[in-house]
Image (tube, rainbow, N blue to C red):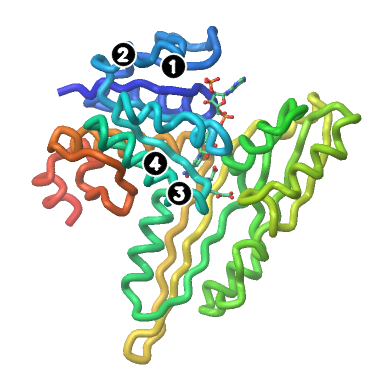
Amino acid sequence: MTIRTAIVGYGNLGRSVEENIRNQPDMELVGIFSRRAELDTDTPVYPVADIDSYRDSVDVLFLCLGSATDIPEQATAFAASFSTVDTYDNHKKIPAHYEAMDEAAADNGNVAIVSTGWDPGLFSLNRTIASSIFPTSQQNTFWGKGVSQGHSDALRRIDGVKKAVQYTIPREDAIEAARGGHGADVTGHGAHLRQCWVVADESEHDRIREEIVTMPDYFVGYEVEVHFISQEDFARDHQGLPHGGHVITSGTLGGTTNAVEFSLALESNPDFTAAVQVAYGRAAYRLKDAGLTGAFSVLEVPPYLLAPESLEELLTRDV
Ligand SMILES: NC(=O)C1=CN([C@@H]2O[C@H](COP(=O)(O)OP(=O)(O)OC[C@H]3O[C@@H](n4cnc5c(N)ncnc54)[C@H](OP(=O)(O)O)[C@@H]3O)[C@@H](O)[C@H]2O)C=CC1
Ligand SMILES: N[C@@H](CCCC(=O)C(=O)O)C(=O)O
């Protein structure tokens, strides 16, 4: 059995999904759908406007679009025609995204796995598992230092921005406080600096800075630095896409203090995010094959469905 996959949107994440699928034993890549006519790839490229004519030749469509504007505007139309897997990461709006994808997918007999990746994604799973272990717990999430693709995409959607990247920088003292069980006063907003490096014409700097610091969900409430630099400096200093972070949970059980920490250290945020997304693609295929439809979050997908191995093999190897 070969799962016939396709990609919509060919940026950092789309390129990493393409490369990842090449190494999957049970998947093939039918093509890439893009708004742009020409892409630098050997994979067949099709106009996204024609995507519906490929309904019968694609089992799972990977949505590799930006979360700031693309996914809210386009994702439900894709879910009406295909089983999909996305990495939508605007946390406040995930419940509404889930509901919209559920309706679009269920009405058309498809599966939509939403908000995979690592945060949301593997961090979400860990937050739920760790907090379920304790009757009461203290839980803190830290990101970085690294490139948030979601925040960088949001910067690039501002008119006049030619290039942009956003580094999320956590306060080390806040991480240590959480590890010591003293994270109660640590908030996500207070524990991170959002550092933006932007290329734009000088006449636009003031307006762009204002749009960044007032952007809801992404920047409001955080300490934000905005640095305008030249194309040359951007090309020299801001090509890497590392990231990572920690979910730290602690609680007391019968008078003893116990802690759980889940950490990621990623040399490439898109390569890792793509790897998670592709594994959930296998699950999407299997859920649909089992007759299920509608939206699923990572909390609702049994982990064995992610693996190419059989449940019997996993019981022997991993349990
Ligand atoms: N859940 C998680 O853990 C994570 C989630 N993400 C999510 O992934 C999303 C995508 O990130 P990323 O791939 O870095 O975003 P990009 O900005 O690289 O790509 C987003 C879209 O922009 C278009 N695009 C890309 N490059 C160009 C270009 N040179 N010129 C014009 N258009 C271009 C592509 O669409 P088209 O081909 O149609 O032009 C693409 O799908 C983020 O918004 C984030 O939300 C990322 C990391 C972790
Ligand atoms: N969704 C993030 C991954 C989690 C890190 C994060 O949320 C941040 O740096 O703000 C991303 O787009 O890179």
CB at disc 2 and ligand 1 closer than 8 Å: no
CB at disc 1 and ligand 1 closer than 8 Å: yes
Q: Tag on residue 54?
A: 2
Q: In this view, does 265 lie above or below 60?
A: below
* Residue bearing the label numbered 3: 94
Q: Quadrant of residue 183?
A: bottom right
What crowding class fits label 3: few (fewer than 14 Cα within 10 Å), some (14-19), or many (20 or more)?
A: some
Q: What is the C-alpha distance between the residues marked 2 and 3?
A: 28 Å
Residue 306 pos. (x, y %):
25, 41
Hey, which residue is sitting farthest right in the picture? Answer: 203
User: Looking at the image, can residue 235 be seen?
Assistant: no
Residue 278 pos. (x, y %):
34, 33
- Secondary element type, mark 1: strand
* Residue bearing the label numbered 1: 33
Residue type beneath disc 4:
Ala
Hey, which residue is sitting farthest left in the picture? Answer: 312
| Tag nearer the camera, 1 or 2 | 2
Mark 1 / mark 4, whichever is N-terminal: 1
Q: Which residue is drawn at 59% across and 75% down?
A: 177
Mark 2 / mark 4, whichever is N-terminal: 2
Residue type beneath disc 3:
Ile
Q: Tag on residue 100?
A: 4
Residue type beneath disc 2:
Tyr
Q: Quadrant of residue 208?
A: top right
